[in-house]
Amino acid sequence: MSSDKNYNPKNLLSLLSKTHKFLKNMDQQDAYELYVLLMDSLIESAMKKDDKKDRNLTVGNIFGFICLARLECLECKKVSWNKDFNLSLTVSLTKQKVCKWKAP
C-alpha cells in the first residue's frame, strides 16, 4: 500500500460485525478483543476451505505457539510437563520508577 492512501477501519469493523453482532452497537473494544476476533475469523475461514494445501497454512500454524510448563514435586522430585497451544500471551507489566539519566 502506498503512503498516500489511508485505510478506513470502518471497512474492517463492518466486515467483522457481520459475524460478531455485538460490534454493531459501536461500543469501544480493546485491541486484544479485536485480535481475538480476527484470529477466530481467520481460523473459521481456513476450516471452510476444501484445499488441504491451504489448511496446512492455518492461522494456528502461522500465529500459534506451544507453551511448556514444568512442574516438579518438592518431595519426590517427580517432574511433569504440560503443553498448551496458544494464539496469544498475556504479560503483566508493573510500573517502575524511571531514573532520570543525563548524558555526560
Image (cartoon, helix red, strand yellow):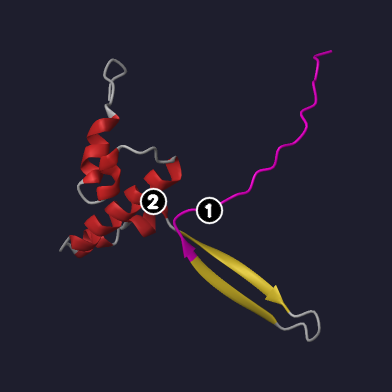
x 40%, y 41%: residue? 29
Residue designated by label 1: 89
Position of residue 97 relative to residue 52, above or below, is: above
Front position in the image: 92 or 49? 92
Which type of secondary structure does the marked residue at label 1 adopt?
loop
Main SS, magenta region, reads loop
* Position of residue 70 measured from the top left corner of the image (x, y, whole percent): 66, 71
Could you tell me the amino acid type at mark 2?
Val
31 is within the stretch colored magenta = no
Task: Please check the rendered image and state whether residue 89 is part of the magenta-colored stretch, yes or no.
Answer: yes
Given residues 1 and 37, the one toward you in this image is 37
* Image height of 71 relative to 20, above or below: below
Above or below, 57 relative to 17: below
* Residue 36: image tag: 2
User: Does dot 2 land on a helix, a strand or a loop?
Assistant: helix
Find the magenta span and give its range: 85-104
In front here: 24 or 74? 24
> Which amino acid, by three-letter code, is at mark 1?
Leu
Furthest toward the left, the residue is 50
- Which picture quadrant has residue 8? top left
Q: Name the residue at 41% across, 53% down.
A: 63
Q: Residue at x 25, y 45 (%)?
A: 16
Q: CA distance from mark 1 to mark 2?
A: 12 Å
